[in-house]
Amino acid sequence: MKSRKRIIITLLVCLGLAALAYYAYLFPFYEFETNDYEASREKLFSAEYLKTLLPLFIITGLSALGIVLIIRLRKLMLRADGKYSRFAARQKSKKAKAPKQKPVPFMIVRWLIMIVFSFLMIWGGLLFGLKMSSVSIPILSCPWNTEQMTESSCYYLSHLSELFEMPVKSILIFFGSTVGFILLLGRAVCGFLCPIGLIQDIMDKIRRKTKTEGISANEKVYNALTPIKWCMVLLFIGLCFIGGNFCNFCPAVATSPILAGMSTSLYVSGFLMVFALIGGFFKRRLFCNICPLGYIVGLFHKVSLFRIKKDCTACTECGACYEACPMGIKSIYTEREKKDVTEANCIMCGECVRRCPEDKALSLTCAGIKLYTSSRKDIMSGYAPKKK
Amino acid sequence: MMTTTREMQRKQRQDARFISKQTQTSAKYLRRIAELPGAPDGMEPFYETLHRIYVGMQGVDLPLGVNAVGTYCVMAPQELIYAAGAMPVKLCSGNYTAFFVGDDIAPRDACPLVKAVAGFKHTGLMPIYDNCSMMIVPVTCDCKKKTAAMLSKKCNVMTMHIPASRGDDEIDGFTDQLYELAAWLEDATGNRITYDSLVNAFSMVGHAQYELSKFIRLKKQHPYLIRGTHAMTIMNAAAYMSAPAWANAMHRVNASLRERAEKGQTVTSKKLPRILLTGSPIVFPNMKIPLLIEETGGIAAADETCMGERGMWDPPVITDNSFDGMMRALANRSLRPCPCPTFADNSQRLFRLRQLIRDNQIQGVIYHVLRGCLVYDFEYRRIEEELGRLGIPVIRLESDYNEEDVEQLRIRIEAFIELIKLRQAPAEKAAVRRDFNEQILHWA
């Protein structure tokens, strides 16, 4: 009975999503009088730019409001629950900080790459004249931003019908570069390059700074997200064939083109961006869990160069990696035989390696070279006595 | 009236006998540990702590206004107790004298650890038991469950339910339980557990764990740097010391060990057989097995027991730095990495043993079973099979809290160590010896 109920609910949610995606143009989030895809360097530094940024301000405002509301609501709800409420309501002093590990080079590099790459994807063409428009990278960086550094594959993957009308050479370049990146980097593009990923990581950082409780997602939550992800994949690929436009639905539209100074009308994508921001605040990289493009890239996880390796003898099954994993990959700590624990969902963020307390138990490798290895020293670095 | 006076006198005599017997055994074991050559510098605080509690018959070294909370398992998180402004004291007992008293109270098949606890509680002579007006008893086996009932007559007892598996739901449930425990601790101590106090507690215990991980790294990298008996004494003393005091003492030991490692000093010049001790907890003063190992020419290179390294080895990994995140980290740390046989599927213990064998170049495993400790006894078969596959000899030693079986144990341990020596001897020598043995057999 229970499972039937769950199936019905899942089906309803998926159908709702499909309908929302198909009729996305009926739900305008913010409409400009005319969509203007011309951007120039002058426009970036003029007052007109602020006007184009307006939808972004609305999104940020709505997200902030949503987050505050949810925190308030949760407090109210917790008041009824005697167990938590006596602890939840207490004040925290600003001084007290939970023990923190010292930053490691890998994480610093990852953040730098994410920030620099996102910056280039948005303003690269405008500010620095960097344009290699024929190469496509499989990330959610909106291709409506015509001035971005390189093309992103998401447009043609979601508009396959348009792709096949193009000259053969373009098709070959498109597939060649996309497949090439998938094979080379795999889902490392999600952890290192994707601007939507960066935005969600920033939201998570803010939550950590404010010491707000997140949602401790367990298997049930991830299991509930899986059918939604499949539904998203179907919509992503199939919508163009039945006359819809995934771009009206995709949250990525709400960032890159607008930031580059292009007035782009937002439909459901604006609402979805608010959802992604609020979700990313409470649950790290929530959107990545339902990202259709990431899923497609993940299908090829068996052949990509980036891998998570595990020394099964060194593992104590403490589950710290699973707790840390934003994608909820459980096999990483339950695996006791295989050396390679790379999963379709793994975005190579390195969080599991960072939180692993056993020496050399987990490592992130690229083409066999160890980029980042877990160590007890790193974990305990926050507890080291202060030198006098 | 006459009878009551006589009874009182008898009771007094009994108590005096109990105290003298108890202090004598404890002093003897302390002396034997101290006499073992090769102890690193800075062991004094650990000896002193054990001496004060078992020989001096004094309580724990409590700062003024701090309560002591007794715990009976490593699954009761120390961090929470420190956060409530109290000090955790591990009350699991290894006392022979108390065991004899408890023998009459607890059923015949109960394990000696529980009998010793019952004995101490019954005589009411140990000050550390009077220190703790609050006790946390995680129910890891049936004996512990009934211990909780027995203890609750005299003090405030909180039982913790330990689930049989370690899935997601169980971790969620255990987190809920930790909230209950926190509330109970607040009520019992009168202090408040806040974000700040929890952070403080984390860094206090974290510092101790930092020193421990340094200690274990040194031990791993340099074989024969320290004797296992001394290492186990250090870990046993941690039960009665506050985390900062223990960490400070540990810091001195680590410095001395590092110095040794740099100079290339070892406790022995010979290649003694390296033995891993696992199974039921080994609690001071029941140190006969590690002492016998080292007195008969082996070295207890590592241990996998809950009064030993396991108790503090796994750090709580904070993945979410909110209050709830820290509670979750505690719940996760308490259940998931713990290779306690109370869990139905405990195959991770095999892997933990493999890890210890690889890291410490172990040549033989001694499996210690306290008589009546069923869960550990159950796992022996599986571990024997697995170790057989790895080619590591293993021996099961069942013992009780008394000294009657010491000689028998000595013979078995000695033979076991000889066996390992025979295996590690160079091939030629071994061949000669084998011939010799065969000849003996032939003659016989």
Image (cartoon, coloured by chain):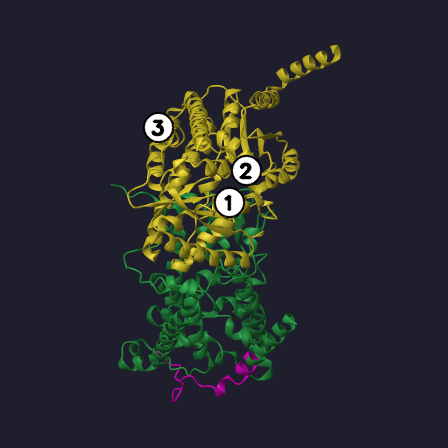
Chain colours: A green, B yellow
In the image, which is nearer the foreground, mark 3 or mark 2? 2
Q: Position of residue B107 (x, y in %)?
A: 59, 38
Q: Name the one closer to the observer, B158 or A348.
A: B158
Q: In which quarter of the image is the C terminus of chain A?
A: top left
**In the image, what residue type sits under mark 1?**
Met
Cα–Cα span, label 1 and label 3:
35 Å
Residue under pointer 3: B44
Residue under pointer 1: B150
Local packing at callout 3 (Cα closer than 10 Å; few below 14, some 14-19, many 20+) is some
Quadrant position of residue B218: top left
**Direction from residue B418 to residue B7 in the image, left or right:** left
Q: Is mark 3 on a helix, strand or loop?
A: helix
The reply to whether residue A69 is visible in this rendering is yes
**In the image, what residue type sits under mark 3?**
Glu
Judging from the image, mark 2 belongs to the subunit labelled: B
- Tell me if residue A32 is in the magenta stretch: yes
The answer to whether B98 is drawn above or below residue B426 in the figure is below
Q: Name the one closer to the observer, A107 or B89.
A: B89
Q: Name the one closer to the observer, B54 or A192.
A: B54
Cα–Cα span, label 3 and label 2:
36 Å
Asked if the residue under mark 1 is in contact with the one under mark 2, i.e. CB atoms within 8 Å, the reply is: yes
The reply to whether residue A137 is visible in this rendering is no
Residue under pointer 2: B105
Local packing at callout 1 (Cα closer than 10 Å; few below 14, some 14-19, many 20+) is some
Tags 3 and 2 both on a single chain: yes
**Direction from residue A224 to residue A278 in the image, left or right:** left
First to last magenta residue range: A17-39
Tags 1 and 3 both on a single chain: yes
The answer to whether B294 is drawn above or below residue A350 in the figure is above
